Amino acid sequence: MIYSLDKINEMAEGDEDFILSVISVFLDEVPADLEALEDALQEKNYEQVYKLAHKIKPNVDLLGMEQTRAVALEMETLGKSEANMNQIEALFPILKTDIKQVVAELKKDFDL
């Protein structure tokens, strides 16, 4: 398991509906953002890469995905400075693999 519900549980204070709501939002938004990020990479659109990595970062952070958060942060930083797109493209498979794994785990763990 590469995610942790510690941060969400702390915020939820036992509210199961809140926890499910946060997970549902993650499952609705993050895969779509990931797909848009992949498109932005193919288009070499630095601004979109920056914006989408920035949007994904707090979502993975909320689920305690520290490595994934670090990758998103690095992609965000590289996109902001219009640095080498090859570096961003090299990081993307890590981000994609982690997110796809967590999406599958969350769906299984919460019967969604």
Image (tube, rainbow, N blue to C red):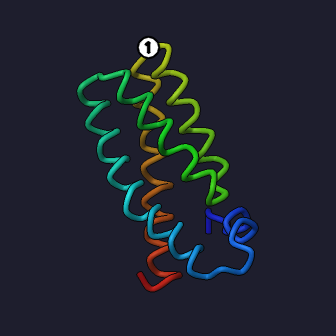
Name the residue at 40% across, 22% down.
Answer: 86
**Label 1 crowd bin: few (<14), some (14–19), many (20+), radius 10 Å:** some
Locate the N terminus and report the quarter of the image it occupies: bottom right
Q: How many marks?
A: 1
Is 10 on the left-hand or right-hand side of 77?
A: right
Q: Is residue 1 above or below residue 67?
A: below
The answer to whether residue 43 is left or right of residue 83 is left
Residue at 45% of width from left, 63% of height from top? 25
Q: Quadrant of residue 9?
A: bottom right
Q: Secondary structure at mark 1?
A: loop
Note whether 33 is above or below 50 in the view shown: below
Please state which amino acid type lies under the numbered disc 1. Answer: Glu
Q: Nearer the viewer, residue 109 or 48?
A: 48
Tell me what residue is drawn at x 50 percent, y 64 percent.
102
The x, y position of residue 21, in whole percent, is: 50, 71
**Residue topped by disc 1:** 82
Quadrant occupied by the C terminus? bottom left
Residue 48 percent location from the top left of the image:
35, 29
